[in-house]
Image (tube, rainbow, N blue to C red):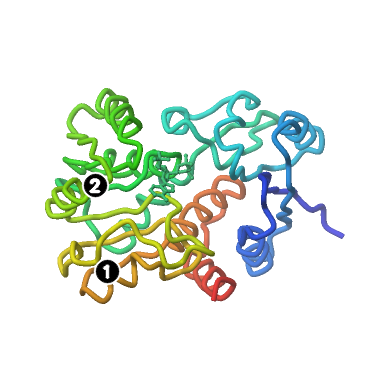
Amino acid sequence: MRHLKLICLIGDPVEHSISPTIHNEVFRELNLNYIYLAFRVVGDDLEHAVRGLKALGASGFNVTLPHKSAIIKYLDEVVPEAMFVGAVNTVVNEGGRFVGYNTDVVGVINTFKSLNIRLSGTSAAVLGAGGASRAVLYALASSGSSEVFLINRTFERAVSLAEEFSVKFPDVRFRPTGLTVSGLRVAVERAQILVNATSVGMYPSVDESLIPPELLRRDLIVFDVVYNPVETKLLRDARLRGATTVDGVHMLVHQAAAAFKLWTKVEPPVDFMFNVAYSSLR
Ligand code: ATR
């Protein structure tokens, strides 16, 4: 048998992740000698798990909740973008050294690029102030958005995030906004792009959305990072109001494609990955 190269996912929980399916189907399709395995790793075991993967000579791994930030201190190097975002979701074994990347950022950038959505000069409204939001903000700011409303339930988190991002991206106007009726109205009315980067709407709470449907309109692009369900309540409301909708499978696939490229140096078959993702989610 050919020598198999090992790629892993570590997180807690990992049972419902479709990353193993996506990557293993691609490895089979392209006849690459890799295997992708998911391991549940609880918090206290993270350091041991990383050392174990190194001892085993793993080619790389994905990191998911709750370890995306904690992993940083166990890596040999973290690229500046991932360091600023404060989260690593992909690690590559580069000659025995574990190097951390954040492919969520390029996942968001490529989501918009692939749909011919130009971000330059746009005003965007982003819901959430956690790790997903930081990747989205980084993508928008580095792709030329000129104004970003940072909407969060805990207003102070939006304020400190805005301060931090303003230092990194001085040309972008970050506007911290509370999750209030008036705050939402001002932000969504000005925005061309609305992004939900919270977990609201995710299975099993499929009837929840933070945006009153009447704020949605035809010339708005609505992107939800939640991919389960594929059409969240927010996206359904947006579709019914005539808006352009972008589901979370886009970010999922584009971040996976970027990770795949980093590990294998092979050009990822993005359309094939979409097919695998949609058929395992539907
Ligand atoms: P992640 O790293 O996945 O983004 P996180 O750091 O827990 O996760 O952040 C979750 C985000 O979703 C936060 O912005 C959170 O708002 P708070 O900062 O106020 O906690 C937001 N969020 C989660 N559930 C929410 C809800 N039911 N209503 C409004 N915002 C919610």
The residue shown at (20%, 51%) is 181
Q: Tell me which amino acid carries mark 1.
A: Ala
Q: Name the side, left or right, on which 121 lies relative to 238.
A: left
Indicate whether 132 appears above or below 50: below
State ligand 1's quadrant: top left
Residue 12 % position (x, y): 67, 46
The image quadrant that residue 69 belongs to is: top right
Q: Quadrant of the C terminus?
A: bottom right
Indicate whether 166 appears above or below 137: above
Q: Name the side, left or right, on which 143 lies relative to 103.
A: left
Whether label 1 lies within 8 Å of ligand 1 gets the answer no
The image quadrant that residue 262 belongs to is: top right
Whether label 2 lies within 8 Å of ligand 1 gets the answer no
Q: Which mark is residue 180?
A: 2
Q: Name the side, left or right, on which 229 lies relative to 220.
A: right
The image quadrant that residue 149 belongs to is: top left
The residue shown at (26%, 76%) is 240
Q: Name the side, left or right, on which 197 lies relative to 22.
A: left
Counting residues from the N terminus, which is met first, the one under dot 1 or under dot 2? Answer: 2
Extreme residue toward the front, this view = 181
Residue 176 % position (x, y): 24, 35
Residue 83 % position (x, y): 47, 28
Query: Which residue does the numbered mark 1 point to in the structure image?
Result: 238
Q: Tell me which amino acid carries mark 2.
A: Thr
Task: Look at discs 1 and 2 and give the one toward the viewer.
Answer: 2
The residue shown at (30%, 64%) is 115
